[in-house]
Every structure is written in C-alpha cells, then in structure tokens.
Amino acid sequence: MRQVAVAAIAAFLDAPVTGDADRLIRGLSTPDCADSGDLVFVSSRRRTPDVITAGAVLAAPGVEFPEHTTIIRVPDPAAAMMRVIDWLFPATRVFADVSPAAVVDPSAQLGCDVGIGPLAYVGADVCIGDRTEIHPTATIGRGALIGDDCVIHTGVHIYPGTLVGNRVVLHAGVVLGADGFGYIREAMPPALATPDEPERLGKVPHVGRVVIEDDVEIGANSTVDRAMLADTCIGRGTKIDNLVTIGHNSRVGRHCIIIGQAGVSGSTVLGDYVTVAGQAGLAGHIRVGARAVVGAQAGVTKDVPAGERVLGSPAVDARIARKALALIDSLPEFKRRLADHERRLTDVERE
Amino acid sequence: MRQVAVAAIAAFLDAPVTGDADRLIRGLSTPDCADSGDLVFVSSRRRTPDVITAGAVLAAPGVEFPEHTTIIRVPDPAAAMMRVIDWLFPATRVFADVSPAAVVDPSAQLGCDVGIGPLAYVGADVCIGDRTEIHPTATIGRGALIGDDCVIHTGVHIYPGTLVGNRVVLHAGVVLGADGFGYIREAMPPALATPDEPERLGKVPHVGRVVIEDDVEIGANSTVDRAMLADTCIGRGTKIDNLVTIGHNSRVGRHCIIIGQAGVSGSTVLGDYVTVAGQAGLAGHIRVGARAVVGAQAGVTKDVPAGERVLGSPAVDARIARKALALIDSLPEFKRRLADHERRLTDVERE
Amino acid sequence: MRQVAVAAIAAFLDAPVTGDADRLIRGLSTPDCADSGDLVFVSSRRRTPDVITAGAVLAAPGVEFPEHTTIIRVPDPAAAMMRVIDWLFPATRVFADVSPAAVVDPSAQLGCDVGIGPLAYVGADVCIGDRTEIHPTATIGRGALIGDDCVIHTGVHIYPGTLVGNRVVLHAGVVLGADGFGYIREAMPPALATPDEPERLGKVPHVGRVVIEDDVEIGANSTVDRAMLADTCIGRGTKIDNLVTIGHNSRVGRHCIIIGQAGVSGSTVLGDYVTVAGQAGLAGHIRVGARAVVGAQAGVTKDVPAGERVLGSPAVDARIARKALALIDSLPEFKRRLADHERRLTDVERE
C-alpha cells in the first residue's frame, strides 16, 4: 500500500483524531504485531496488549488507551478497517489478458477482458464470461461454462461440463466435478474369482454435473463431486472453507457457511443459511433445514429441522448435547457412585 | 448424449413400455430435477416426488405412478439406468495422443495410444502403459511406472519411483509418494541451542515407494505417502474417496472402500474387503482384519478382528457403541437420578 | 542404490558382522517385505516375522535370530539404518537449472543454482534464494520471497506476498496464502432482497501474509491461510503432515508437530514444541501452551496450559478423558444399574 497520514484516514472515515494526526501510516496490522508505521483496530481491550506499539488505532468510543496513543474514534472499528482496506488496497487484475503461454482450445469462447495466466488450460467448447481470471496451472475441462467476474486461482481443476456462475472465487487446488464415490459390489468374473476374492466393486457411472451458483467462494483444496445424474449444486452466496468435501448429488442452499474439513455426503440437502462448523460430517440422503447450525466435529445421521442447532456424534439438539458431553468427564465419578449406592442398598436390604 | 425414443431404450433393455413410447429422451436425471425430456429411475416411491415431471421412468414392477406416466418396467431400475448410461455415454478418450504442449522427457517410454494432455509433465525414465491418459498439469516423477488403461486426471502429482497398476483412475489433485511423516527429536546443535530451544526434529529419510495395484480408484485431493523402506501399498480393486490420507508403510488390502476424509496412519495393515467410513481415523501400527467395517468418525486405536464392526472414539464393537453413544444424551438424567438415589438412600439409612 | 557388500556396510557403521559378510545388498526394506538382496533393521523381535528373508539384518545386541542369519550388530538399529540411507541415497538435485519450459517473470530475482522445473510459474518481483528447487507446475505468486535450499514440490501454490524461510520443504499440493475464511452477515441490497433471502455474506478482505520460518516441512495438500492483517506464521522447525489446515492469523510455534487432517482455526496461538495429533480440531482465538499435546480427534475449545495433555471433544485433561471415554461403553450397564437401584430403593422405601 501507499503511505498515508492519519489525518487523511480520519478524513476518509469522517472521524475525529486524538494524538499525532500527521503520522504516516505505511501498513495495516494487528495490535500484537504492529510497529509505529501500522494502523490497527481495537474493538475491545480484551486480548489487546497493554502497550500499543502501533502508529495509530481505530477504536470504538469509550475504549481507553495509554496517553500519547494516536486514536481515530469510529463507531465500528472492524467495519472501518474494512473500508480502509478497500480504499488502500483497491482490487487489481492480476491476469488481464490471455497469456501466450496458456493453452486455450480454439473452440473456447472468451468474454471481454478475460485474463488467462501462463500455463493455464482451457479445453474445447469452454465458455468464459467477461472479466473472469484463470490463474496459472488452473484447468477448465471441455464444455464447462464459467460466468463473469470470477477468479479461478492457481491449480483449480474444473472437470468437463461444470457450470460456474458469476463472481465465483475458487481458491487454489479446488476440484469441481470429479466422479462421485459410487460403486456396487458385483461377483468377480468366473475367470478371475477365487475363494478369497469372490467379489469386486463395479463403478457407478457419473454423468451428472456440478453447478456452482453466483457469489460462491470455495477454499483451498476443497472438492465438489459430480452427480451421478442431474446436478450437485452449491447455492448462491454460499461460502465454503478449505479441505471440505461435498458429495455427489447433494444440494447446498443459498448463503450457507461450511467450515474447514467438514464433509457433506452424497444426496444430502441443506436449506438456505445453514452453518456447518469445522470437521463436522453429514451422512448421505438427509435434509438439514434452513438456518440450522451443525456444531464442530458433529456427526449428523438424520434430518435436522429448520433453525435447529445440533452437536455431538451422533448429533442431537445442541443444548442437550453440550450438557451431556460436559458430563462424560464425570463418568468415573458416576461409576464410583453407582458402586457406592449398590453397597449401601445391599446393606439397607440386609437389615 | 444423443436423443433417443423411449421405445428404443425399452428395446435396448428388452423391457415393456406403458405410455408414450414415441417420446424423445434427451437427458438422464433424478425424479426431483427432471423435465419432460429426461429419463429417471425409481426403485421405490419413498423419497420420490408425487408429481412425475420426467419424460419417462425406469421402474420396478409393482411401484405405482400417476396415470399417463410413461414407464419402462425393469426388475432392477438402478442397474438398468447404469446400462442405459453406458450405452448413451460411451467412454471416450479425452487425450488420445501426446500434446506438443506437454513436457515429456526423451527417456520416457510410452505404450501404444498413450494420451498426454497439454501442460502435463513426464519425467526421465518414466514408463507408461498402453492407452493410458495423462491429463493437463498432471506430473509423473522420474522412474515412475504407470500401467495400461489408466486415467491420471488434471493436477495429479506422482513422485519419483511410484508404481501404478492397470486400469487405475486417479482424480484431480491426488498426490502419490510424498515423504512419510517421520521425524525424531534430536538435540539442537550446540551452536544453535538455547534454553527454550534445546531440541529439533530430524527428518527420517524415506526411500521406499508407493505401489497402487490394478483397478484402484482414488478421489480428488487424497494422498498416499511413500514408505520409509519397502512399500506403501493399495491393494487391487480398492476404492478411495476424496481427501483421504494413507500413511507411510501402511498396506491396504484388496477391494476395500475408504470414504471421504478418513485417515490411515503409518504402518497400519487393512485386510481385504475392509470398509472405512467417512472421517474415521486409524492409529498407526494396527491391523484391521478382512471384511471389518469401521464406522464414520470412529477412532480406531487397536487391532480389529476380521468381520467385526467398530464405532466410536476409541472404537469398540459397533452394537455396543451404538447403544452407548445413544445414551450420552441421557447423562444429565443419569446425574439427576444418581442425586435422587443418593438423597433417598440417605433418608432410608437415617431411618 | 548401488549394490554393496555386507562387510562394507558394517565397516561404514564400524560394527561387527556375523554370517555372510560377502553377501551383496541391493536394496533396503522391512522384515515382512524383504528378499535376499535386502538389508533390514530390527529393534525388537515383537512384530518381526519368525523367518528372516532379508539378506542381512541391522540388529540390537541381545535380539536373537534363526541360525545362518547375517547380522550387523549396532546399538541403535533405526539410527544405523538412517545413516546407511544417507550414505547409499545421497541427496541429489532433481532440477538444478531453469527449464526453458518454465515461465519466470523477468523481474524475478533468482539466487545461485536455483532449479526451476518445466511448467513451473514464477511471478513478478518474486525472490528465490540459492539452491532452491521449484518443481513442475508449482506456482509462486507476485512478490513472494523464498529462502535458500528449499524444495517446492509439484503443484504447490504460493499466493502473492508470502514469505518462506530457508530449508523449507513443501510437498505437492500445498497451498500457502489463500484468503482466510472471514465473512460478515450483511443486509441484502434492497433491490435483491426477498423475504427468504434477506441477508448475504460480505467478504472480509485479507491483506495480511503467510510467513513460513526456516526448516519447516508441510505435507501434501495442506493449506495455510493468509492473515486478514499482519501474518499467519508457522514457527521454525515445525513439521506439518498431509491435509492439515491452518486458519488465518493463527501462529504456530517452533518445532511443533501437527499430524494429518488436524485443523487449527483462525487467530489461535500454539507455543513451541506443541503436538497436535491426527484429525484434532482447535477452535479459533485460543492459546495452547508450549509442549502441550492435543490427542487424536480431540476438539479443543479453550486454552490449554503449557505441558498439558488433552483429549476428547470437548477436550479435557487426557488422563481424565481416557478413563471417561473408556466408560462410555458402560452406559447401557449404568442405565440398567440405575433402574435396578430405582426398583430396589422403591421396595426399601415401601417397607
């Protein structure tokens, strides 16, 4: 970023300064890492170091600081910092035209101002919308359709026939459209069968697609599998974190949040505004209603009604689960008390 | 797919039609997504929408539909649909020759009809069997051997010296042969040691290999690590889902199923026909017997006898675990009852 | 490896031989896989097959073998094998110069003897230290700094502005610097809002960096996210396994071990020498003290004091958790005993 005076930032935010308004800010940081050229934001003094090393602080009214701290007072410091970021780090195109070192099939149709980086691959009959960027080593398989204003980062792999909407961001290593995990046990052909190898797994063909709606963002190395028939669908505005897997024929609603390393099995349906926390797993063929919240590491084995919060494995209502899980540590005590009651009951009965 | 009349599909399946045999089918779908040009299959009316929007239905005998539905009656609708898919979507080669935009070391040996896509990399002394396809941006390290009729999808990375059998399918982002995770704590060299940095982790060299036997399929972004010595081995016909990790020196048997996000630690041995469900974790140096089933999210810490089903973390016999896990929610009630018994016992004892 | 006589290996280790010192060793292996040309090591006879098929054994004093086994006696067989590996498999450069098939921006600065493989991408203003290797299809984004003697394997993706120290090894598919997972719920713009779509998720911009210190190794397909502000940092000498995700703004200490499929959420801080076992998950904004150990599949929801071991989900002291988790299987019995006590208490009270 360019350097800018505290006064200029305050003017941009239309906010008052106390302290050194002429100080030059050269970076943005967090209170525990900042040096005298950095601007930081502090929403509360909890977890904030006592000594403010930053050059200036975006702070909420009433939050106190040591004397001589340079402070820009704003009602919502986090929101103000986001406005400052957007101002000082304007979005820039990294790849704004088609690199001669990319491989683009002549039959591919590219919109206006499409950027394709070196060593990217765009297959036959692919269609890419205006201003979309395809970064180096990303691959777009035959017949895929990508909308406008997307960013397809390095090493993303989109299988043939996939549909991607507008303003979609796919981070490095995302895989869309690999075959779903479907097999059927079948007898080994007689010529190959042996007593300890009587069966094998026959592949279920997958001729459906993956459909990613507008404004979806998917984190690094996550995967969304192709449907057997019809579509695996990620609804508009949904955000998916890193290393998440979405199974074949599942349908994720709009504006959902799916956090790192969670997994959604095949044919499962999530309503709108659902949250799935980290490392949670959803069984196949279940329905999770709108605005439901699945807790971290939960194992969901049956339908979840709209708005419900679940936790545990198998997952149940989160309030019940939280109380119950907290009592697991008491099991040794429960065991002792059961033995104690046993002994005392026997005594009482004897009398 | 090309369009085809219902009558032609029925003739192909040698099955009777009721309804509009002349209707043209232009796609295959699922009952909840289908339009009037789609063929769907319905094995039972559970979870099937009441209104059939599809153009025609592959249905089992006895399953009833609204009047005017066009039905092809078959004994096993799922199997019939798979036959139809194979017929209407014949397997086609995507890359049938060596792209001039691929980088293939002159010392590599390629079988007949090998396809190597643009921007793929094939290192020195690699040997690739007949009809195998290497998709764009896949990399095959020095001295790896790949069999016949394999499909190595985009962005697969095969480290040097790996062995891959025939008819193996590796989905995008699979990594075979990265170093196993092995370190030993060692004293920091005196020149670098400090009171709070007395030790460091020394790398255990990994000079073994990964061996993938015939007919294995591995899902997107899964990893199989190189052995320290000898081989990490995935047995014939085994199917591995997305984001699975298989540790160094482990040996997975034949025809196993390992579902998404499961992990097998180093030196663990799985017999044939083992199933490991999603997000399960197996500790290192254990043995799981043939046809054992490890439940979803289980944490297996010790050997599992052949044929046994285990669940929970730590994992135990699945029938016991299922009953026990279902009672976790009752812990608050157990606690209340223990307190109640305590009180009543004290009362009784006082008398 | 080249072939070498048992006597030569013994001389290199300065260790005595019993048996056939002239035997030629052509490979290194494990006792259960070895043939007569292999050297193996045996630290104890537990889990070692009764029949020794290997050509020679590195064995500790006192460990007994069948007659005619060729044995090199060493105090620490594992350490001796590592010395033999280093001797017989000297580290070699795979890519020792810049391939003409790589794409390197003219503004990138390369140290001495940098190796850049075919189809690798190095962006503008990147700086790469001496002797570092960038393997095929790896990508280094604009302005990233990579130190000396690093190995950046195939398909690694380093986002712009990332800092990587010296002697860092990144395995295939690692992603450094993707945007952290941060969104805020915001009202849908009036023109788009509907009763069932009133809000959307606004992206929190991420302008911080990822910093990887010296001697770190990261396993295949793991991800480390960019900080919103300041840095996500992996401390010197830390080793991370496959499919691990490290969230934005978290700071991992020095010489930590993070095992496969574990996840560290945003803004969490780990001290030095921390161990996080496989599939464990750490919530955001917590602190794990130096030398703490987080057990496999644990779910850590609050701070962990230095040196403590935790287990379970939610995680508690490991000794307590181990006893408690082992009693989950007894819950059906607890239930029966509670019912039994209930009945007997009622009987006693009636009298």
Image (spheres, coloured by chain):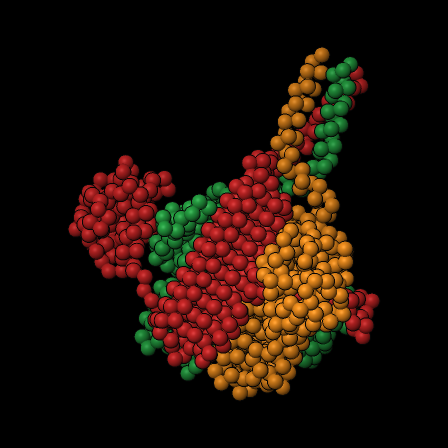
Chain colours: A red, B orange, C green
Q: Position of residue B179 (x, y in %)?
A: 56, 67
Question: Closest to the observer: A78 or C246?
Answer: A78
- Whether residue C339 is visible here, answered yes or no, is yes
Label tally = 0
Q: Is residue A61 left or right of residue C293?
A: left
Q: Nearer the viewer, residue A327 or B332?
A: B332
Q: Quadrant of the C terminus of chain A?
A: top right
Q: Name the spot of residue C218 as percent of width and height, x first.
A: 49, 62
Would you say residue C218 is visible in this rendering?
Answer: no
Which residue occupies the extreme left position in the image?
Answer: A22
Q: Quadrant of residue B112?
A: bottom right
Q: Residue at x 63, y 27 (%)?
A: B336
Left or right for A256, reference B52? left
In percent of the image, x 51 and y 72: which residue is there?
Answer: A143
Q: Given the current orientation, which residue lies at the most extreme bottom position?
A: B106
Residue B172 quadrant: bottom right
Horizontal arrangement in the rendering, residue B128 relative to residue A52 (left or right) = right
- Is residue B321 or residue C44 the one in the foreground? B321
Q: Residue at x 61, y 50 (%)?
A: A286
Q: Quadrant of the N terminus of chain A?
A: bottom left
Residue B208: give x, y in percent of width and height.
Answer: 61, 71
Please state the horizontal and vertical placement of residue A331, each as a whole percent of the image. Answer: 64, 35
Residue occupying the point 58% across, 61% down: B35
Q: Residue furthest right?
A: A195
